[in-house]
Image (cartoon, rainbow, N blue to C red):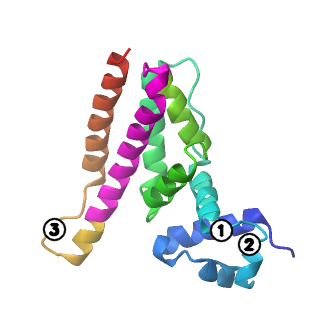
Amino acid sequence: MALSRDEVVATAVGLLRRYGLGDLTMRRLARELGVAPGALYWHVANKQELLVEVADALLSEIPPAPQGHPPAEALAGLCVAVRDALVQVPDAADVVGMAYAVDPGATRALRDVARLVHDAGAPASERDEVAALVVHHVLGSIGGQQNRGLAALGDPDLPPPDPASEAKAFEVGLAVVIRGIERSH
């Protein structure tokens, strides 16, 4: 059976979920697929392109932002959905952050964030910067929770993060950001 781009990406997502970004190498991916590393480059040009595809796959199950809802409400719901989709995947914030740096519109969910930021009131001239602020708030929340979890594993005196408290803190910060967006117009 011939190797496909979809198989390469799905296997990379599986490696990320199981082992994290540090073990998602092109050599490891090739070994998992039973091919020589060079065979991967028929499907992705480089690791950056692979990680953009992995980010897209991680966010692909998030439904489109609902139509007919107030933009600020839809933006908040979308950001919570992105966080929920990524928080249990090791290093997902780093992968999506890298994909966002390469191409802010690489995934539908991140394009929806930018659109909703504008619709919620951010001036068109500042939309990209405000959307980046929102995306980085989401990714920073995920990275912080995951880092606190790793720190607690290595230090028995540190309590593990409480997912409910982490989610609440994220939502409080997000509400402040969205209020600022709405006031900007």
Give the position of the N terminus as an image quadrant: bottom right
Structural crowding at the residue carrying mark 3, measured as other residues with C-alpha within 10 Å and reported as few (<14), some (14–19) or many (≥20): few
Distance, label 1 to label 3, CA atoms, is 39 Å
* Residue at x-position 35% and y-position 27%: 178
Task: Give whichever of discs 3 and 2 has the lower sequence position.
Answer: 2
Q: CA distance from mark 2 to mark 1?
A: 7 Å
Overall secondary structure of the magenta section: helix
Q: Along the horizontal axis of the image, is 181 left or right of 160?
A: right
Task: Look at the picture and state if 93 lies above or below 14.
Answer: above
Seen at 62% across and 83% down, the residue is 27
Mark 1, mark 3: which one is toward the viewer? 1
Image quadrant containing the C terminus: top left
Q: What crowding class fits label 1: few (fewer than 14 Cα within 10 Å), some (14-19), or many (20 or more)? A: few
Q: Amino acid at mark 2?
A: Tyr
Which amino acid does the dot numbered 3 rest on? Leu
Residue 79, horizontal then vertical, whole percent:
44, 38
Picture coordinates of residue 147, whole percent (x, y)? 30, 64
Question: Which residue was labeled with disc 1?
Answer: 46
Circle 2 packing at 10 Å, graded few (<14), some (14-19), many (20+), is some
Residue highlighted by disc 3: 158
Under tag 2, what secondary structure? loop
Q: Earlier in the sequence, mark 1 or mark 3?
A: 1
Residue placed under numbered mark 2 in the picture: 41
**Residue 148, relative to residue 132: is it above or below?**
below
Which range of residues does the magenta coloring cover?
119-148
The answer to whether any part of residue 96 appears in the image is yes
Q: Are marks 2 and 1 in contact (CB under 8 Å)?
A: yes
